[in-house]
Amino acid sequence: MSHYYRLVVSCPDRVGIVARVSGFIASQGGSITEANQHSDLATGRFFMRYEILADSVALDAEALRRAFAPIAAEFSMDWALTDTARRPRVVLMVSKASHCLVDLLYRWTARELDCDIPCVISNHDDMRALVEWHGIPYHHVPVEADDKSAAFAKVESLIESAEADTIVLARYMQILPPGLCERHAGRVINIHHSFLPSFAGAKPYHQAYERGVKLIGATCHYVTQELDAGPIIEQDIHRVSHCHTADDLVRFGRDVEKSVLARGLRWHLQDRVLIHGNKTVVFA
Amino acid sequence: MSHYYRLVVSCPDRVGIVARVSGFIASQGGSITEANQHSDLATGRFFMRYEILADSVALDAEALRRAFAPIAAEFSMDWALTDTARRPRVVLMVSKASHCLVDLLYRWTARELDCDIPCVISNHDDMRALVEWHGIPYHHVPVEADDKSAAFAKVESLIESAEADTIVLARYMQILPPGLCERHAGRVINIHHSFLPSFAGAKPYHQAYERGVKLIGATCHYVTQELDAGPIIEQDIHRVSHCHTADDLVRFGRDVEKSVLARGLRWHLQDRVLIHGNKTVVFA
Amino acid sequence: MSHYYRLVVSCPDRVGIVARVSGFIASQGGSITEANQHSDLATGRFFMRYEILADSVALDAEALRRAFAPIAAEFSMDWALTDTARRPRVVLMVSKASHCLVDLLYRWTARELDCDIPCVISNHDDMRALVEWHGIPYHHVPVEADDKSAAFAKVESLIESAEADTIVLARYMQILPPGLCERHAGRVINIHHSFLPSFAGAKPYHQAYERGVKLIGATCHYVTQELDAGPIIEQDIHRVSHCHTADDLVRFGRDVEKSVLARGLRWHLQDRVLIHGNKTVVFA
Amino acid sequence: MSHYYRLVVSCPDRVGIVARVSGFIASQGGSITEANQHSDLATGRFFMRYEILADSVALDAEALRRAFAPIAAEFSMDWALTDTARRPRVVLMVSKASHCLVDLLYRWTARELDCDIPCVISNHDDMRALVEWHGIPYHHVPVEADDKSAAFAKVESLIESAEADTIVLARYMQILPPGLCERHAGRVINIHHSFLPSFAGAKPYHQAYERGVKLIGATCHYVTQELDAGPIIEQDIHRVSHCHTADDLVRFGRDVEKSVLARGLRWHLQDRVLIHGNKTVVFA
């Protein structure tokens, strides 16, 4: 099966970036199958993503990176070149709610999510049978309310052993310690069950019910040290009315959460999400 | 053309309310063309709305009210019986932005909004030609930053002269004084240009832009003394991305605002919105 | 746990139906937790659905039916009174695509679908492990292209043994024989992978791709003898663009299909869907 | 105010197009403010659109075209380079329904549609006052059922006198003669009041009502000689239920029609719509 190189760049905008990058790709014989660019006029920053048919290029990924490095330096680029032949490794973290987990495992099985899942980590043992049925190791790491540090040390060691590129909080319901957030900045994805910035924090559907909103939502975002305040990747909503109880909101919310998380994760895994301060550029 | 009686009721829930009310309507020969009921299980309150073909009933509206009053008393009902032959009177208040005004005037002309518009009040003179072209009187009441009381006294006297049932803040951009809000509780409708409770207060699209949300919204709500915190009637959203500037958000927002306000106002004018604490029951 | 009686009625509209039915319920002490009514002004037909707390009524379901029968006769009602204590029995039929099956099994596990699933029937053996993991019997009934009658005789005998109330074609991909459709009229639910009436028949996503539509959809409907032409229960759509291949449309479509089918089936199981000619009244 | 050059290209895909085009722009000092590309893998065709700050380029539009022509020839490009300093000229054609016209005139006034409107043509005189209030000439060209050729000759001569770039059928309700369609291929935009390909032809809302669909829609498309079958630019939908009459569908539909037409026209005027066989690439 064909594989692709993905070149993702952000840098200060100026005349000639596209010419230089596309000229380089062309000089390597590279066939570009998808190209996205964005000039942020407010901040003067430029973003681009190229998907290149690997077979059209003589160099391998590492050699291509070396050849591109001088251009990157000249334009002060933040950049990465990934090879889809190397599948990213995603650790899922869950608690007791299964809807996002079931959904992600289905999509993984259906090849909608192009990644390996080295393990699932949970503070409860409830999801073990489901996870193991999919042939994925399951780690039960209880989190004690009075001392969470041992648990999170264990979690972090499991993440390291798994060589995880991405950690997904698929309704994990525990707040990660700041150090862990910092060490994995831009690589931890959370699904929050509200339309942020409304209803940050606990029990958002009950907050929404009390306020009497007519739409509820969910937000997929990168985790930062500030709770529910990281860069937003994707959001969506579901219409509700006076007919619906707080439990109905929870039920509708499950559907929104799982589709928003799945979209956000898929884009992240395809290198379509570029972080820009506390915002994202999403080449969806 | 046929007219209708609309009976709107809320009361403590108990067995037999519907039987009693529908029995009364049937005993008058009343043909019910639309019926809505809602039992709020959390608060034990019951809500209903009946639309009755007026020609099917021998009594006129006032006599029907007198006949119904004992039932209302027995069940401790908050209630009203309106006659669509009497068109509600709606005063529009605007500032410089024309989108909601143009939209409401179009819908009024197209008979989507079944009301009279005795006048439009504005703190600027910009919309005069448009309003007068529709044959509606226009009152320019400037609001001075350092003393707003004279202006609002003038506004309130215009509202009274207009015998307004409903006041619509169609992007009026001024905060009404608490006394005016209180005296017209449940009758002043505002359109806020965000998906409340996110981004209450000033310049919500710019707040949304800064936060990097992926959906923007608008909220139609009743005005209370607490800014942007009254009962929500309707909300809707529009998808945005990194491609869009703050000006684009403002532009998309105009479309959401006008459709949300038009829906909310239409439902209000059809007696479809029942206030319940700080929430609404909307029999849409 | 509390159970409910659900009274569902359709009949020619006339003055006094609601008074008579609600009077009857009140006379039995019945506490109505949800009530929906609809008068179809075009056809003069009336529809209603009451949900009644079973514990509030002295009679059991059968006695309540006997007590109601004279009223039903007087108003020429089509009607049913169900008891939620008796869970409906749903047979799922699938082929090789798993997305709807996985979704329905998840919702069944999460108690979003209040039913028993006596078995799953498929013309392929692919889904056996998944189904049996949920503790549900799996019947593999191959359908030969040149003679399908034996297979469908077997299918119908399995449906009868399962005492199925409802049959769900969760992407079954075979056309049921007319006799089977007729014998189970109003009880066979299909998910069609297009926004009907566009793209009836085979390969709708490829038809949609060829036509260059900007939205794709899915339709949940009752099966009748005419292919893809039965009463529609629910529809929804997903936005697409020139960026998307026919395969992308298939992928987006899976999400739409499963949510549309789940909503339609849930409403059907809650007696919220009333068939009216080739249309439906859905008290959602 | 700054103006922009827009370069729009489609050609057979091959390695090096972007490098060549962006190299050319960079060599002219061109600052690219927006760039979109699309490789259609199914047909092997490539599409691109660049927006270039005019002040960053020394050449004027005509000189830039001459300089680019050899590259265009080398890659067998269909291409155009427009200058936003020259506003496109749009003739609106209407019948008796005013909703799209009111909406387009509002957006034009609010500078959402960057064009001149040299005139409005109608087969009825109803919209004259509205149009003339906006300072736009109004031509009443009655169309006789038994001989339409004289009317359409008059229409075409008005279009020519107006030097129209684009003709918008804003609910014109007459079928244009094939010759006129052919002579203005890719420049006549229609709004059809259904979710095509469902319900082509007359009275689509009534067709939709009869079929019992749960969503209605509208379609903005280029007019071709085959009725309602031209390349689709944009579509959208509105949810409906059994509660809604055919008249309600018409009312909801008006809102969908006007927003779909406004989006489609705006994109067309910004050179964001590239026709590709009977489909469109829309760089929205």
Image: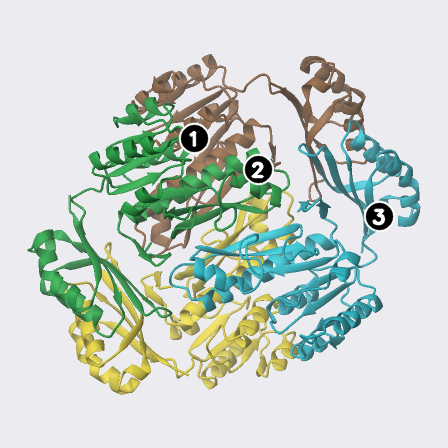
Chain colours: A yellow, B brown, C cyan, D green
The residue nearer to you, when weighing D228 against C185, is D228
Corner quadrant of residue B24: top right
User: Where is A217 relative to C95, above or below?
Assistant: above
Across and down, in percent, residue A202 comes to: 55, 57
Labelled disc at residue D97 = 1
The residue under label 2 is B278
> Which structural element holds mark 3?
helix
Disc 1 marks a residue whose amino acid type is Ala
Evaluate if marks 1 and 2 touch, with contact meaning CB atoms under 8 Å apart.
Answer: no
> Which structural element holds mark 2?
loop
Labels 1, 2: one chain: no
Across and down, in percent, residue B276 comes to: 62, 35
Q: Is residue B193 visible?
A: no
Characterize the local packing of mark 1: few (<14), some (14-19) or many (20 or more) Cα atoms within 10 angstroms: some
Label 1 and label 2: CA atoms lie apart by 40 Å
Label 3 and label 1: CA atoms lie apart by 53 Å
- Disc 2 is attached to a residue of which chain? B
Quadrant containing the N terminus of chain D in the rendered view = top left
- Disc 3 is attached to a residue of which chain? C
Residue at the (52%, 26%) spot, across then down: B187
Labelled disc at residue C216 = none
Labels 3, 2: one chain: no
Relative to D207, C26 lies left or right: right
Residue at the (22%, 42%) spot, across then down: D88
Disc 2 marks a residue whose amino acid type is Asn
Corner quadrant of residue C52: top right
